[in-house]
Image: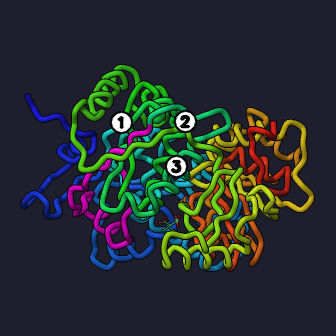
């Protein structure tokens, strides 16, 4: 009998091309290399200087997302953004890399378009010069972010040096309650175990609650694995995965698909496979979450109050809470539901797929965005935008007073026009809330799409379960 293996080990064994000795970095073959405008310019320049080509242009796919304006996509005011996008276009032309740039029907956030085009598939090793590459792990792919020099290495060789990852089983039992989402689940998990519990590991999310999640929900939790410090996060493929991929543009077709589906299902972790570490969590206990601080673990249920630094366990925590409260302009003991907001951002690679937008729209029910709030909805891709419009979601949002924008990273980070002004507060469906993330001195509160939508209408945080 062969030893039971986790999916992480199965993908590793399949893709290692050279391993000097166990424990030392090995050369890993990369099945898909995703590229965006921010982390690729120097990598292509490096190839040019060395007279090298892109080894596998067909396994490489580029898009534009971080810098893209979301009002008029062709009017790029920021010169650095413009340069990065022009450079990507030139590089893709010169090196023969497929590009879904501005104006292309597939343009969108790199981690949204990979799955929706079916480029992301179980068992693939996937890299991108972007930390949230972990999103693709939802399909049972080993997907992780790399630095710009590694981007150059992968472009040139289609391989990367990697140390075999340690495995962490995050077993999530129970069931999410009504009104509680995958976003609340991952926020509550990070709140419980901290922003570095995944450091040095690839997480596999297992358990009943994970099996019940849609692919969109799985993408949301895998996306935020990085905020728990992990190298990557993944979910073993099952029927939900297969059903999502069938018929996608780059997925195999006909009999090829059925054959691939059998191979994909066989990649799931074997029963009794051993992990380096296991933690357990109960989904039934999760409430809708709101972050109050400047990292994702500084998070409380919507009916909770802002923590008091005086009650911290130690001096270090006390100072951290104090500093976060100061930056966020919050007082200890205030119910988070009394905190007024000025902005709402529904978007980002965490929560900008059709399902997310549908869930956010379901909260509106004829109500209007609060007069003090500016709320924007930014679909993750052109494909999402089109599909959402077919379902009439754009109308629902617009009638309620939300702005309906063009796809891109937008307010997730302050790298384009959608910057939150200093001192202003934003309920955001994105994944990072550190100081300055959405703009200098801007204050970010991470929430689910439903919670963001409810906050837009109420003008402050509110429990979606009592709002409907
Ligand atoms: C710009 C890019 C390198 C960065 C990342 O790696 O994650 C961005 O996508 C982010 O979310 O902070
Ligand atoms: S949406 Fe945000 S987190 Fe995702 S790739 Fe863009 S900037 Fe990074």
Q: Residue at x 68, y 47 (%)?
A: 449
Residue topped by disc 1? 236
147 or 72: which is nearer to us? 147
Tell me the quarter of the image containing the C terminus.
top right
Specify whether 166 is left or right of 431.
left
How crowded is the residue under tag 1: few (<14 C-alpha within 10 Å), some, or many (20+)? many
| Mark 3 within 8 Å of ligand 2, using the beta carbon | no
Query: Label 3: which residue?
Result: 186
Report the front residue among 200 and 388: 200
Check if residue 147 falls in the magenta segment: yes
Mark sitting on residue 284: 2
List x then y, in percent, for residue 132.
47, 57
* Disc 1 within 8 angstroms of ligand 2 (CB): no
Q: Earlier in the sequence, mark 3 or mark 2?
A: 3
Q: Is residue 292 above or below residue 360?
A: below
**Residue 369 x %, y %:** 87, 51
Task: Classify 10 Å Cα crowding around label 3: few (below 14), some (14-19), many (20 and above).
Answer: many
Read off the magenta span.
Answer: 143-172
- Is label 3 in contact with label 1 (beta carbons under 8 Å)? no
- Residue contact between numbered discs 2 and 1, judged by CB atoms under 8 Å: no
Q: Position of residue 181 (x, y in %)?
A: 60, 40
Residue sitting farthest toward the right: 371
Instruction: Label 2, secondary structure: give it.
Output: helix
- Tag in front: 2 or 1: 2
- How many residues crowd mark 2 within 10 Å: few (<14), some (14–19), many (20+)? some
Q: Where is the N terminus found, in terms of image quarters? A: top left
């Amino acid at each position: 009998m062969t030893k039971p293996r986790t999916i992480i080990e199965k993908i590793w064994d399949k893709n290692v091309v050279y391993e000097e000795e166990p424990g030392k970095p090995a050369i890993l073959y990369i099945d898909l290399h995703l590229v965006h405008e921010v982390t690729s310019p120097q990598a292509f320049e490096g190839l040019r200087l060395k007279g090298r080509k892109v080894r596998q242009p067909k396994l490489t796919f580029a898009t534009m997302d971080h810098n893209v304006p979301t009002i008029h996509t062709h009017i790029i005011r920021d010169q650095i953004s413009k340069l990065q996008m022009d450079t990507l276009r030139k590089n893709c032309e010169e090196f023969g890399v497929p590009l879904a740039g501005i104006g292309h029907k597939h343009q969108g956030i790199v981690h949204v378009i990979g799955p929706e085009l079916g480029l992301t598939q179980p068992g693939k090793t996937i890299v991108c010069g972007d930390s949230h590459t972990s999103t693709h792990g939802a399909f049972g792919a080993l997907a992780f972010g790399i630095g710009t020099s590694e981007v150059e290495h992968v472009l040139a060789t289609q391989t990367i040096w990697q140390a075999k990852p340690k495995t962490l089983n995050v077993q999530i039992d129970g069931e999410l309650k009504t009104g509680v989402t995958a976003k609340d689940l991952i926020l509550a998990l990070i709140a419980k175990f901290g922003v570095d519990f995944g450091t040095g590991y690839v997480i596999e999310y297992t358990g009943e609650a994970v099996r019940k999640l849609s692919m969109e929900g799985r993408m949301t939790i895998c996306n935020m694995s990085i905020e728990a410090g992990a190298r990557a996060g993944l979910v073993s493929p099952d029927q939900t995965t297969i059903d999502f991929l069938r018929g996608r543009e780059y997925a195999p077709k006909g009999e090829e698909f059925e054959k691939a589906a059998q191979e994909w299902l066989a990649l799931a972790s074997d029963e009794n496979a051993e992990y380096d570490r296991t933690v357990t969590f109960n989904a039934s206990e999760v409430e809708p979450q709101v972050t109050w601080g400047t990292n994702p673990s500084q998070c409380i249920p919507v009916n909770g109050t802002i923590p008091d630094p005086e009650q911290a366990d130690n001096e270090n925590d006390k100072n951290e809470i104090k500093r976060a409260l100061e930056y966020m302009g919050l007082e200890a003991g205030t119910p988070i539901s009394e905190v007024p907001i000025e902005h709402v951002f529904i978007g980002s690679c965490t929560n900008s797929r059709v399902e997310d937008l549908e869930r956010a729209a379901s909260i509106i029910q004829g109500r209007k965005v609060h007069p003090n709030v500016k709320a924007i909805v930014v679909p993750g891709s052109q494909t999402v935008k089109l599909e959402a419009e077919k379902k009439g979601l754009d109308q629902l949002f617009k009638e309620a007073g939300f702005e309906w924008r063009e796809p891109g990273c937008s307010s997730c980070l302050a790298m384009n026009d959608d910057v939150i002004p200093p001192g202003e507060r934003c309920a955001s469906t994105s994944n990072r809330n550190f100081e300055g993330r959405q703009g200098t001195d801007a204050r970010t509160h991470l929430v689910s799409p439903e919670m963001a939508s409810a906050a837009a209408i109420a003008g402050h945080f509110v429990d979606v379960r009592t709002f409907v």
